Amino acid sequence: MIICRWFISLQLFLLCTLICLVGYDPPQSEAQTDSPQQSDQTSQSVTPKRAPRTLEAFQNAIKSGQVGTISGRALFKGELPPPKELRVTLNKKTCGHTYQSESLLVSEKRGIQNVVVSLLRIPKGLPTETGDKPIQIDQQRCVFIPHVLLVPAGTEFEALNSDPISHNFHTIGSHNKELNIMQTKTKRRRLPLTFPEPDTIKVICDVHSWMKAWIIVTEHPYYALTNADGQFRLENVPEGAYRIRAWHEELGKPPVQEVVVTTNQDAKVDFEFSQPEKAAQ
């Protein structure tokens, strides 16, 4: 009888143990609970697709339509500067008596005009479309028009003198030959010029000291100039991650930014500039 009871107790013990083992469901770790879709999304957000690094890959992306746009604004941070008015000291009949400087133009909504925005590390050899109209910089009523001109490297443009007085077209850059050419009211009123190297070139007239402009000699198509509201737009950019910079003649360069372009999407980038500490050289 004792042996029988012991045997029954042993059977009950073994049965309970088996039930506990079969019914036990261990908790999953955090790594196990994440779905494959969540893991993929995380890795994609951390490591965006690189922009094309070769000319062939860049052109193939454009041909296949794997492109988007980049747009944004250049904004002034801080107290708005008052407009600068310059005195005219010579040829007042043609030039007038005063001139409002274009070296820093800020709208009521803090948009900065004439900021040059460009992408970095773009493959060499991409053609830049210039349109049917000739690229020109003119001297009208003793003012360079436009104040900032974008010209592709190696592309011919024209320097004009539309005033009935003499000017001289004096260029000062870092990577192109300095020019200093007199344009009288009868001679050399239309100058065909070419700058072979990418550069930031200051243009002055030594006859009229207030006259100043800038020629940005570009190395690829992805340059833009902000309008009166500080807006810019870069189109037909192959998808991928880029570095983008901005430059202003008085405000200098804010930090370079990162931007990711997605096919058929518009990537937004804004640049903030503060009160100038010193003029650009």
Image: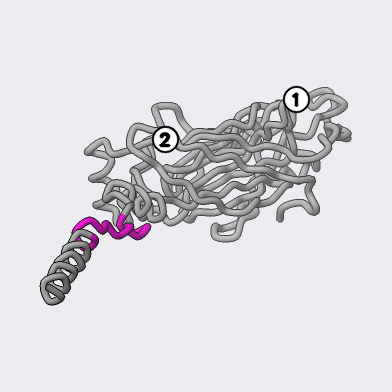
Question: What amino acid type is highlighted by mark number 2?
Answer: Thr
Q: Report whether residue 202 is seen.
A: yes
Q: CA distance from mark 1 to mark 2?
A: 26 Å
- Residue 165, image quadrant: top right
**Is residue 168 in the magenta section?**
no
Judging by the rendered image, the residue that carries numbered circle 1 is: 108
Q: Residue at x 40, y 49 (%)?
A: 45
Measured as percent of width and height from the top left, residue 2 is found at 15, 75
Judging by the rendered image, the residue that carries numbered circle 2 is: 69
**In the image shown, does 135 or 260 lie closer to the viewer?**
260
Q: Secondary structure at mark 1?
A: loop
Locate residue 180 relative to residue 38 in the image: left or right. right
Measured as percent of width and height from the top left, residue 264 is found at 34, 32
The answer to whether residue 246 is above or below residue 165 is: below
Q: Which residues are magenta?
A: 20-32
The answer to whether residue 33 is above or below residue 17 is: above
- Quarter of the picture holding the N terminus: bottom left
Q: Secondary structure at mark 2?
A: strand
Measured as percent of width and height from the top left, residue 280 is found at 72, 52
Number of residues whose C-alpha sits closer than 10 Å to that of mark 2, classed few (under 14), some (14–19) or many (20 or more):
many
**In the image shown, does 194 or 62 lie closer to the viewer?**
62
Earlier along the polypeptide chain: callout 1 or callout 2?
Answer: 2
Number of residues whose C-alpha sits closer than 10 Å to that of mark 1, classed few (under 14), some (14–19) or many (20 or more):
few
Locate residue 80 relative to residue 191 in the image: left or right. right
- Disc sitting over residue 32 in the figure: none
